[in-house]
Image: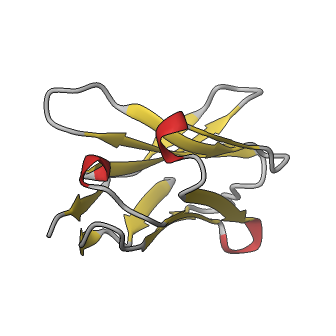
């Protein structure tokens, strides 16, 4: 059984930084062939894509986080990261990790981690 476990969320002041981690586990599971991404969701709104990194290492970002957030992956550790700098109150949300394999469309989601940006 594959599990994605997010960590690193919390309360931070505007302008501060957080680093989210998403650790994948499962017998013989590797994130290497998976595109990895971070989404976020606030109450009453649809889940939105924040950042993604393909299996080949190509990164994409939502316009709202470009220049502030950085996604990275460590295949050896089966972990993907989201470095978030210059945080704003609008970044407050539950952040979810997703793994999707392009050739099979097999998809896994984590349970989410709360990020709150407030003074």
In the rendering, at what x and y percent does residue 102 appear?
Answer: 73, 29
Task: Tell me: 30 left or right of 14.
Answer: right
Tell me the residue at 40%/32% (across/down).
Answer: 48
Tell me the residue at 74%/43% (across/down).
Answer: 54
Question: Coloring scheme of the render?
Answer: secondary structure
In the rendering, at what x and y percent does residue 11 appear?
Answer: 21, 72
Image height check: is 87 above or below 96?
Answer: below
In the image shown, does 98 or 62 lie closer to the viewer?
62
Q: Residue furthest right?
A: 56
Tell me the residue at 71%/26% (across/down).
Answer: 104
Q: How many numbered marks are there?
A: 0
In the rendering, at what x and y percent does residue 115 appear?
Answer: 27, 61
Tell me the residue at 37%/61% (across/down).
Answer: 87
In the image shown, does 105 or 84 lie closer to the viewer?
84
Q: Quadrant of the C terminus?
A: bottom left
Task: Tell me: 42 left or right of 18.
Answer: left
Image height check: is 15 above or below 4?
Answer: below
In the image shown, does 45 or 103 lie closer to the viewer?
45
In the rendering, at what x and y percent does residue 64 appear?
Answer: 47, 39
Image height check: is 46 above or below 24?
Answer: above
In the image shown, does 4 or 72 lie closer to the viewer?
72
């Amino acid at each position: 059984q594959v599990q994605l476990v997010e960590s690193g969320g919390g309360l931070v002041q505007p302008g501060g930084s957080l680093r989210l981690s998403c650790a994948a586990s499962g017998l013989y599971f590797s994130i290497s062939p998976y595109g990895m991404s971070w989404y976020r969701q606030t109450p009453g709104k649809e889940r939105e894509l924040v950042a993604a990194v393909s299996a080949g290492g190509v990164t994409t970002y939502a316009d709202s986080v470009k220049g502030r957030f950085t996604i990275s992956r460590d295949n050896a550790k089966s972990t993907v990261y989201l470095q978030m700098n210059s945080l704003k109150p609008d970044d407050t949300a539950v952040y979810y990790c997703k793994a999707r394999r392009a050739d099979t469309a097999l998809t896994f989601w984590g349970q989410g981690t709360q990020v709150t940006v407030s003074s």
